[in-house]
Amino acid sequence: REREGEASAVGRLGRRSHTRVYAMGFQAFLGRVLFSAVFLSAGINKAQELWSNGGVQTMQYMKPKLDALAVQLAGTVGQAAPLATLAQYYQYLLVAACVMEIVGPLMFMLGSDHGARIMALFLAGVTPIMHNFWNAQGMEKMIEMIMFMKNVSMLGALLMYLGMKSDKSKKEKED
């Protein structure tokens, strides 16, 4: 009888452990979905606007920021910035942003580290260019600073996720 009791206790513990693993897996999946929602909705909105009218509204926001970057880089190199020539390529950057904001989160939701890397690369490239609060004034400065800090915190979360995954895979290889 004692052995039967021990066996049923072990069985119950095994089921609880199994349930906990499923709950953790679901929580991680839900967290990835919620995290990705910001990127996915922005990417879909940009893609819809790009498809319907060539991304006019988004391009109006992007162009001055990309022009300022081009002028700054040209000044660093010591040459004049060919803004008219560069501006014709801005739409390709918008397409790349749409792809990264849609593909990265979808991959991340499904548990791919590559999705996290795509989103981290997107944030690292876009944040200092599109949310350059140091060049803004008044209320725009405050909004851009909030957006900048939001993106920096999201980048930090992605880097932490990738670091934890890397540590976990190293430990698994050692075992």
Image (tube, helix red, strand yellow):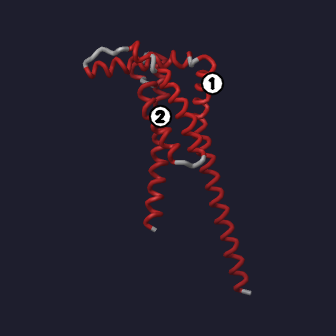
Instruction: Identify which residue, 155 or 48, lies in the foreground.
Output: 48
Q: Quadrant of the N terminus?
A: bottom right
Between disc 2 and disc 1, the foreground one is 1
Splitting the image into 4 quarters, where does residue 18 fall? bottom right
Mark 1 lies on residue: 48
Q: Amino acid at mark 2?
A: Phe
- Residue 48 as seen in the image, left or right of residue 73: right
Q: Are marks 2 and 1 in contact (CB under 8 Å)?
A: no
Q: Secondary structure at mark 1?
A: helix
Q: Amino acid at mark 1?
A: Gln
Give above or below for 1 relative to 13.
below
Instruction: Identify which residue, 59 or 84, lies in the foreground.
Output: 84
- Residue 55 as seen in the image, left or right of residue 90: right
Q: Earlier in the sequence, mark 2 or mark 1?
A: 1
Give above or below for 84 relative to 35.
above
Mark 2 is surrounded, within 10 Å at the Cα level, by few (under 14), some (14 to 19) or many (20 or more) other residues, namely some
Splitting the image into 4 quarters, where does residue 58 fall? top right
Mark 1 is surrounded, within 10 Å at the Cα level, by few (under 14), some (14 to 19) or many (20 or more) other residues, namely some
- Residue 107 as seen in the image, left or right of residue 22: left
Label 2 – label 1 distance at C-alpha: 19 Å
- Across and down, in percent, residue 95 comes to 53, 27
Mark 2 lies on residue: 122
Q: Residue at x 70, y 85 (%)?
A: 3
Splitting the image into 4 quarters, where does residue 15 fall? bottom right
Q: Residue at x 50, y 45 (%)?
A: 114
Q: Residue at x 43, y 23 (%)?
A: 133
